[in-house]
Amino acid sequence: MTTDETADVVVVGGGPAGLAAAIALRGQGVARVVVLEREAQAGGVPRHSAHLGYGMRDMHRIMAGPAYAAAMRTRAEQAGVDIRTATTATDWTGATSLQTVNRHGMSNIHARAVVLATGVRERPRAALLVPGDRGGGVFTTGSLQQLTTIHHGQPGTRAVIVGAQHVSFSAVLTLQHAACRTVAMVTPLTRHQTYAPLRLLTAGRHRVPIITGCTVEAIHGRDHVRAVTLSNGRRIDCDTVVFTGDWIPDHELARRGDIVIDDTHRGPAIDTAFRTNRVGVFAIGNMVHPAETADVCALDGRHAATAVRQWLEHPAWPTTRVRLIAEAPVAWVAPSRLGEPGTAPGGRITLRVDRLTPSRTVAVTQGTTTLWWGRPRGRLVPNRSITIPGAWLVDADPGGADIIVSLQP
Amino acid sequence: MPEPDDLPYDVVVIGAGVVGCAVARLLSHQHLRVALLDAAPDVGSGTSKANTAILHTGFDATPGSLESRLVSRGYELLSDYAPTVGIAIERTGAALVAWDDEQAAALPGLAAKAGANGYHAASVVDAATVYELEPHLGTGVAAGMLVPDEHIIDPWGTPLAFAREALANGVSWLPNRHVTKLERQFDTTVIESSDGATVRTRCVVNAAGLHSDEVHALFGLAGFTIRPRRGELIVFDKLARPLLQRTLLPVPTGHTKGVLVAPTVFGNVMLGPTADDIDDRTATGSTRAGIDALLAKGRRILPALIREEVTAVYAGLRAATEHSDYQITHDREFRYVCLGGIRSTGLTASMAIAEEALALVAACGLEVIPKAAGSIRSTQVTNLGEAFERPYQVGASGDIVCHCERVTHDEIVAACTEQPPATTFDGIRRRTRALAGRCQGFYCSAAVCSIAAESSGRPMSDWMGAP
Ligand SMILES: Cc1cc2nc3c(=O)[nH]c(=O)nc-3n(C[C@H](O)[C@H](O)[C@H](O)COP(=O)(O)OP(=O)(O)OC[C@H]3O[C@@H](n4cnc5c(N)ncnc54)[C@H](O)[C@@H]3O)c2cc1C
Ligand SMILES: Cc1cc2nc3c(=O)[nH]c(=O)nc-3n(C[C@H](O)[C@H](O)[C@H](O)COP(=O)(O)OP(=O)(O)OC[C@H]3O[C@@H](n4cnc5c(N)ncnc54)[C@H](O)[C@@H]3O)c2cc1C
């Protein structure tokens, strides 16, 4: 038996982005806001991430992940958000209607707007095509943190961490709490990609060597990991390997709905109002910029709420969308489509580079017109975002050529 | 050697791969005392878990060979059996794709060979027809041959279904016994395993796959040597599934069936296998060279496939020998049946090989009396086919735990409690698909293992293995 129900807005994914959007929508007077969350509890990834580092920009304090997730849940409940846990959105049954499934079976929910906030996952070892044996002890940061935080399980005692970006150092902390020593971090780049204080507090404090310019070429150990071989030929004995931070958006539902996926980061291509190409469907959070901190995702949610409410009040959807193209070494820009009205969320555009580069100047051009040119604050380092102001968006031609975002020497 | 004190079994089957399990099942339908024994903790954990899962018509077998006959017969038997117990078969068919004129010229000969193997539905078609059927194929297709009955099957559920039915009908399951010695004592054989345990039996069936020659040698017999042929495989994300309708086969060379692209019943797309003759019978790891070679082939066959995410990479070892046919023999004096050299078609042929084995057990002098049809118990496995109704869709089997593959709480519990139970992470995967999805455990591995720990009464650390 399939049941049918209706809502004003359905948010898919109860992580920081989805909950923040739902709270803000209720705050703006939208009556029926439903959040679908497939896990037993809403809160998203922070639920598993036991260390400090959450809430800076949205709650203006520093919290541990589970406390941050709990605070988000409380706010959502107080705001009157209808959170359906252990409920998965499986498919589309109409433009803004979804099929859901939970322990009672399947149902349909019809809304006037859908907000996708399904997050990202880390590419596991197989997706990274790392050859070798398939023994146990190989994790992603996500599976490692679930093991230790939620299920109080134990990894091994000697770990190699693949990656040296923020989340990799988060893995160092998690391992340290579980009394597992990180014997090396390995990155193909020539330096780590986190902020100096985070590195010092984690890897630095425990003298973890960061091996740069290297990849893991093979994993050894048929039943359980015994060692890894690096591309420089070195073999490191270990019983735990953690693959960190090669993000891929959870875009299944988006793709099933024929939502255009941005070729660069593989998340939905959204415009400056978080709109996808599918009428009435928005996308927010890490799935549209893999991956930022939770507070940034929550701020997305707040900004998007305004765009969603405007759509509910004046149902008009852009038909043409000028693309923002990332030109190497720019890896991606978000948002990557120009929408009218031409303002960016929070007034800024986010971008990343795919390699270390000496250039520090970003240029935005459309045809022969230079729309913006300048040096953003912060370093251009792979796996780390910087933002540029978005005031120039009002000068762009919404019927014009692709907008190119590039670096200048 | 310690004295075995208990009553001897009538038949002990060494090896619980798809072949050994099929044999045990058929033996369980007779009035015989039977044991199924394996070095591994679980059934189906050797070559049988790592293949391309095609239900072969046998169109390209060597006409007149034992393999040709048993593949055809096995196809019929398994096609009939599978739907009755929950083994998923998807009737996709296959297309042999010729990429140049030379390959195209070989197609009529292959169609004739199919006929000689008793398969008459193959038809040669032009390139335009091939593209119409499979628009995502790369450029340069010269012609094709359609094999409408070459289907795909669940390779994990098949040995499990056989074993479950065998156990339900009285077969003893003896896991974790690596056979190291066979000794004839009067009219029985004493089987000793590396843990020192022994079992006594009147008849031995050797279904030891990659080690079938070693078990053969324990009787002092010779005649074939296994030379493993490694096949590496890449499994792509379910989002790639719409890229093809049927299995895309290459025109075979003498050495192997070649690299194919096939849908899987689990809803993924598989690219492989490679074919490397190696010496190490345990070398089931993947290699950089193998992965690169497959990606290069895949890029040509189905270019859009390579842009999709990879879900898994693994390798299986075919039990190839110096002979080109199965090595199925018996020794009346030793009361011994050898099912050796079952290389690249054993999943399809398994039920026919079992019929062969039963006849040879009788030929060894055992009295084979079938049980009354009504007294044979039938069992079910969870249908893991994406094209079939899954437990989560019906509801009432608890929350979804593995989100990528949509596996419910109750399915994990069943995997750990129903006979023969899963005892490893991998065993859960093969019974439920949990952990076999795109995130490879990013979200659920810890949750799955904690349910397994709870329902099995064994600690979490026993379960948290390879994502
Ligand atoms: C190891 C690690 C450490 C981190 N450390 C920090 C830190 O110190 N500080 C910080 O600020 N950030 C940190 N982050 C990043 C932070 O966790 C993310 O920015 C944030 O969780 C992203 O929020 P989101 O809402 O976009 O996605 P998520 O938190 O991923 O939430 C997505 C939700 O959607 C649900 N979902 C997905 N598909 C469906 C569906 N079809 N139906 C129903 N529900 C669905 C998921 O279950 C999930 O709950 C860390 C991340 C990781 C992985
Ligand atoms: C890459 C690849 C692709 C393939 N594709 C297909 C296909 O598409 N279709 C198809 O029909 N077939 C295919 N096959 C072939 C098929 O997988 C095999 O023929 C089949 O699995 C063989 O089953 P088995 O029971 O003989 O061997 P196995 O599954 O290897 O079982 C043998 C068992 O014996 C046990 N054992 C060994 N020695 C001992 C000992 N001394 N003591 C105790 N136990 C022992 C092992 O632990 C193992 O469990 C493929 C094979 C490969 C490698």
Image (tube, helix red, strand yellow):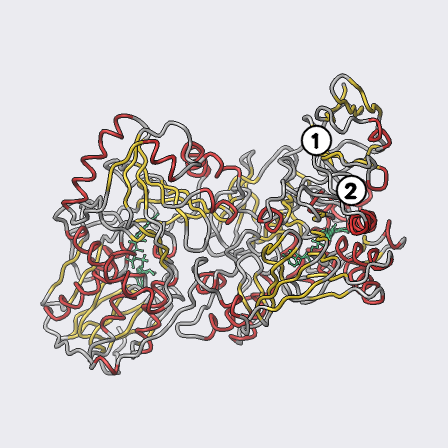
Disc 1 + disc 2, Cβ < 8 Å:
no
How far apart marks 1 and 2 lie (CA) works out to: 14 Å
User: Mark 2 falls on what kind of element?
Assistant: loop
Can you give x and y, in whole percent of width and height, for residue B141 in the image?
35, 30
Left or right: where A369 falls relative to B79: right
Query: Mark 1 near ligand 1 (CB under 8 Å)?
Result: no
| Residue sitting at x 16%, y 63% | B356
Q: Give the crowd class for mark 1: few <14, some 14-19, many >=20 residues within 10 Å.
A: many
Can you give x and y, in whole percent of width and height, for residue A235 in the image?
54, 41
Which mark is drawn over residue A279?
none
Query: Mark 2 near ligand 1 (CB under 8 Å)?
Result: no
Q: Residue at label 2? A: A273
Can you give x and y, in whole percent of width and height, for residue B200 in the image?
23, 75
Is residue A300 in sight in this rendering?
Answer: no
Q: Quadrant of the N terminus of chain B?
A: bottom left
Q: Looking at numbered disc 2 in the image, what kind of residue is underneath it?
A: Ala
Does residue A301 sit above or below B86 in this rendering?
above
Lower position in the chain sequence, tag 1 or tag 2: 2
Q: Which chain letter goes with mark 2?
A: A
Can you give x and y, in whole percent of width and height, for residue A348 in the image?
83, 37
Of residue B214 and residue B158, the one placed in the foreground of this image is B158
Which quadrant of the structure image shows residue A339? top right
Q: Looking at numbered disc 1 in the image, what kind of residue is underneath it?
A: Arg
Of residue B198 and residue A26, the one placed in the foreground of this image is A26
Q: Give the crowd class for mark 2: few <14, some 14-19, many >=20 residues within 10 Å.
A: many
Q: Which chain letter goes with mark 1?
A: A
Is residue B72 in sight in this rendering?
Answer: yes
Q: Residue at label 1? A: A323
